[in-house]
Image (spheres, rainbow, N blue to C red):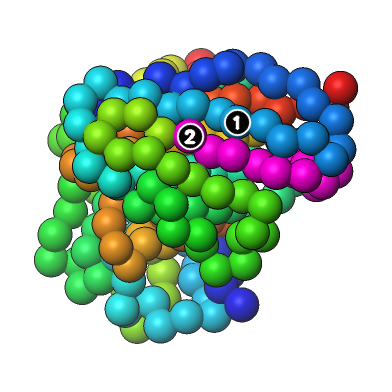
Amino acid sequence: EVQLVESGGGLVQPGRSMKLSCAASGFTFSNYGMAWVRQAPTKGLEWVATISYDGSSTYYRDSVKGRFTISRDNAKSTLYLQMNSLRSEDTATYYCTRAGDYGFYFDYWGQGVMVTVSS
Amino acid sequence: DVQMTQSPSNLAASPGESVSIDCKASKTISKYLAWYQQKPGKANKLLIYSGSTLQSGTPSRFSGSGSGTDFTLTIRNLEPEDFGLYYCQQHNEYPPTFGAGTKLELK
C-alpha cells in the first residue's frame, strides 16, 4: 500500500524558514517523480513544485521560485521542501504527492501538513 | 498558465441519481485532464486521468469525457461515499493547474 506521510509543519514568522519532509513507503520511491501541492484555508488546490525520479530536474511555480527548494533522498525514500523567506500567502496545507506515470498529475497523496505563516 | 473553470460550484443530489461536473480549459489541453475527490480526514484520491482513463480502484460508476477545452465528469447511481469535493486539473503542460472545485452535497 502506498503511503506518504508529511511532517515538519507548524507556525512560523514571516521571513523565516521551514523544512517539510515526506516519508514514502509501499512503492519503489526512486522510480517516481514527486511533487508538493498546497491548499490555502478554504481555497482550492495549487501545485508548488515537482522533482524528477532521480532529482536531476526540478520545477516550481513562479511565486515560490528562488524561495522554495524541492529535493529528495532516494536512499531514505524521503521527499523534502525547504521553504525560505516565508510569506503570509504561503499559509496552507502542504500535500506530498506521487507523480503519475503518464504526465503531470498526482496519483497518490499524503494527508497533508499545515504551515501557518504569521507573526 | 492554463486557467481551469469548473461548474457548477455546488451541486446537490440524492443517492441513486446521476450528476455531471464540467471543466473548461482556457486553451486546448488535448486529452490531458485529471479528476480528484477530496473528503475531510482522507487523502485526496485520483479518480481519472488523461480525460477518461479510470485510475485503478475507481468504481465504474465514474466516467470522464471530453478533449480540447471541454471536459465532463459523470457519476452514475450516486453512492453515499461519493459526496465531497471534486477538482479537475490539466496535466498537459507546466504549471499544472486546478479548477476551483465542485462541492457535491446530499440533497
- Dot 1 falls on a residue whose secondary structure is strand
Per the image, the residue denoted by label 2 is B72
Q: Is residue A48 visible?
A: no
Q: Chain of mark 2?
A: B
Residue B49, above or below A18: below
Task: Give the farthest residue toward the left.
Answer: A56
Residue B12, above or below B58: above
Which is more toward the observer, A6 or A118? A6
Per the image, the residue denoted by label 1 is B20
Q: Earlier in the sequence, mark 1 or mark 2?
A: 1
Q: Crowding at label 2, few (<14), some or many (≥20) Cα neighbours within 10 Å?
A: many
Which is more toward the observer, A81 or B32? B32
Q: Quadrant of residue B15?
A: top right
Q: Is residue B11 visible?
A: yes
**Which residue: 35% across, 29% down?**
B70
Tell me if A104 is positioned left or right of A37 in this view. Answer: left
Tell me if A51 is positioned left or right of A78 in this view. Answer: left
The magenta segment: B72-84
Structural distance between the alpha carbons of marks 1 and 2: 6 Å
Q: Does the magenta segment cover residue B79?
A: yes
Q: Crowding at label 1, few (<14), some or many (≥20) Cα neighbours within 10 Å?
A: some
- Dot 2 falls on a residue whose secondary structure is strand
Give how far across and how far down residue A96 sits, in percent: 47, 53
In contact (CB < 8 Å): disc 1 and disc 2: yes
Give how far across and how far down residue A64 sits, in percent: 25, 32
Q: Amino acid at mark 1?
A: Ser
Give how far across and how far down residue A111 sits, in percent: 62, 51
Q: Quadrant of the N terminus of chain B?
A: top left
**Which residue: 44% across, 42% down?**
B65
Q: Amino acid at mark 2?
A: Thr
Give how far across and how far down residue B28 sits, in percent: 20, 31
Tell me how many marks there are.
2
